[in-house]
Image (cartoon, coloured by chain):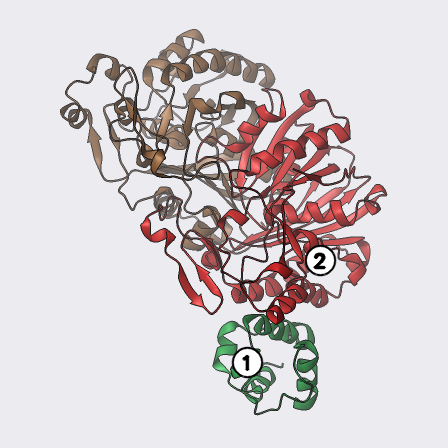
Chain colours: A green, B red, C brown
Amino acid sequence: MDDIKTFIGKLEAELEGLTPGSLTPETNYRQMPEWSSMHALILIALAETEYNISVTGDDLRSCETINDLYALLKSRTS
Amino acid sequence: MAIFSVRGTQVKGIAACVPSAKEYNRDYDWISEAERNLLIKTTGISSRHIAGKGTTTTDLAVPAAELLIRSLGWDKNEIDLLVLVTQSRDYFLPSSGVILQDRIGLPHTCASFDIGLGCSGYVYGMSVVASMLQTGGFRKAILIAGDISTVSLNYKDKSAYPLFGDAVTATGIEFNPGGEASDFNLQSDGGGFEAIIIQDGCVRNPPSDESHIEHEVEKGIIRSRKNLWLNGMDIFNFSVREAPKNITALMNFNGTTEKDYDFFVMHQANLLMNETIRKKLKIPAEKTPYSLKDYGNTSSASIPLTILTQCAEAAQQPRRWLLSGFGVGLSWASCSLFTDKIICPPVLEL
Amino acid sequence: MKARISAIEYVLPEKIYTNEDFFSEFPGAKAETLLKTGVRKRHIAGKDEISSDLAFRAAEKLITENNIDRSAIDFLLFNSADIDYYTPATACVLQGRLGLKNSCGAMDILNGCSGYVYSLGIATGIMESMGAKNILLLNSSTLTRFIHPRDRANRFLFGDAAAASLITFSETGAIGPFVYGTDGKSFEKIIIRHGFARHPVTQESLTDREDEYGNVTNDASFYMDGVGIFLFSVRTVPPMINELLQKAGQTMDDVDLFVFHQPNAFLNEMLRKKLNIPEEKFVHCMADFGNTVQSTIPIALKEMQKQGRLREGMNVVMTGFGTGLSWAATLARF
């Protein structure tokens, strides 16, 4: 599993339209004005292809910040 | 059951008919321009063909089948099997496949019936045609697959409206006793039946006044119970989990690897989802054609429409294909096919 | 490789509509003509009891009575005209409700009166070419929901039911050959005009029409050209049976039992005479059920098993004919 900095870098690359560096571990991504269901799908796709981890809609709803998300992914890394 | 092998299935030709009217997702002013651009980029869908009011699946099926028969130079009297895969047939009864027998001008000896499936329907339909050709004494079959889906969409549902297009395809299939085997892997999970559904209008929930009431499910997603409901997240999770497993199991069964196939033609759901599946399977991009840009998600027509529009030239040589359909049901299926030469007349616009 | 119908169960809705009920509702109805159809009573599904519910019950009964291992079922075929939703497929919904495995194939086959024989043809193909070991075939109809309350003839004729058949791989069994036929030009002879893709149900769909015999229907309801279908059946069925026997290299004497679709006893009796089938080899089985569309043949098979008229090793001709127009026939060794 990547460290959180690399993870954020990959996330920013996928979620276009975000200013690079705008995401931090503390960012509450679901409160961002640009956030939409499309971004949620992009996130799920990233987890599948980069880390081979399945993330559901419920998982995303249980997370608030990038940190939470990272912790979730990490907990599922085998 | 799952995985099995059928001998002698020879796909000889594919034709398609779409409505000429188009809609462009860049014009989809229900959502902001930024959101529109993101949508076009992630779904890979720029435009879609939309049937006019009153046009049904059989109306597109007849010209598609006629074009196919003409292009193949088949004698209509030799066609002894017609299978229609659709979720938008004309009537509760009779079957629409039966109506097509007459409208296409096939003989009374032609067996015809409808199979009701969506995204997985082409592969399922192919498996039924293949097995009936092998065991039922049939010689020439036409598999018609497609839907008019757009009639069930709500313009104010950004999660579904910009995704779907209308198309109907006709595939000509012959029995060749010495031909190679086709392998199939069919699956289903009715536990997820509500992930893609039209709640009202049929027999479980007959149409009522409530069927037409629009609900705001979330921001930008307004639907009534007679509209198509799509739980994008569930479908996404399901597809990226199950489709690769299904394809891998098929390749393990017949001892093939990615390298043995010229093309992986997937049901055209949306680019993000299909690319996730492709990457998980480590299939090179050039082996994975898309017709999403100009046609969107065309239900059971999407696989043959993709072969026809993206691989017509390549299909003039012997090719090995892996086809995979996944979605509504939940139902999913894949198959391997070997073709000698597929006649591919240009898509007909009606 | 061989396929065999190894078990059949059927279920009926609770509500019964007898001839006494009918004639007290329609005192002016012509009893003499109607009674010739051979129906005494029929079962009518409740408002919230739809085809897939009956099919579910039939499947559960089949599984329980025969100790079938659910995980051994490779394929589910649901044959009905009145499906749950436009999408998804009802077979998928039933796969989930019945707790069948995810590697079980599932699809809806939408043919009507010819549906049982068509389903057998598809099941046989799946079994023989794909090596499926157990196929669960569900045939179900709750057509009465589409019959206009004042459509006397059809209310007399039709009943609701579902049947579940287990098709298994067997060295000793055999289903086939098959003869199929289609006449789509006559699709309007049996039809529900509005309610699917061709035409939604609108206010205009509910405009009632009355025929010369006093039967009322409308475009959202079931319609049947009874006389036309009668003539079609008389013209089509006998040559189809002869063609089937020829294809199988058999004669009438080789057949132990003839189980036809049961649209009405008067018609079937005429078909029997035209084909010179001895009475003891011919099955009439509609007195207690009426015309149950896709389920008539499996119900008749089960009834004959119960009565001892259908026994292991017997050679049985089955034929279905009607809406489409579509017809099909086959032979099966039990």
Check disc 1: other Cα within 10 Å, few if <14, some if 14-19, many if 20+: few
Amino acid type for the residue under numbered disc 1: Pro
Q: Quadrant of residue B14?
A: top right
Residue A1 seen in render: no
Above or below for B106 versus C119: above
Above or below for B127 versus C121: below
Looking at the image, the residue that sits furthest to the right is: B317
Amino acid type for the residue under numbered disc 2: Asn
Specify the subunit that label 2 lies on. Answer: B
Q: CA distance from mark 1 to mark 2?
A: 46 Å
Disc 1 + disc 2, Cβ < 8 Å: no
Above or below for A73 versus B242: below
Q: Please give the label number shown on residue B196.
A: none
Mark 1 or mark 2, whichever is nearer to me: 1
Residue C203 locus on image (x, y percent): 34, 38
Residue C222 locus on image (x, y percent): 36, 30
Residue B254 locus on image (x, y percent): 73, 52
Which residue is the site of mark 2? B252
Which residue is the site of mark 1? A33
Q: Secondary structure at mark 1?
A: loop
Q: Quadrant of residue C12?
A: top left
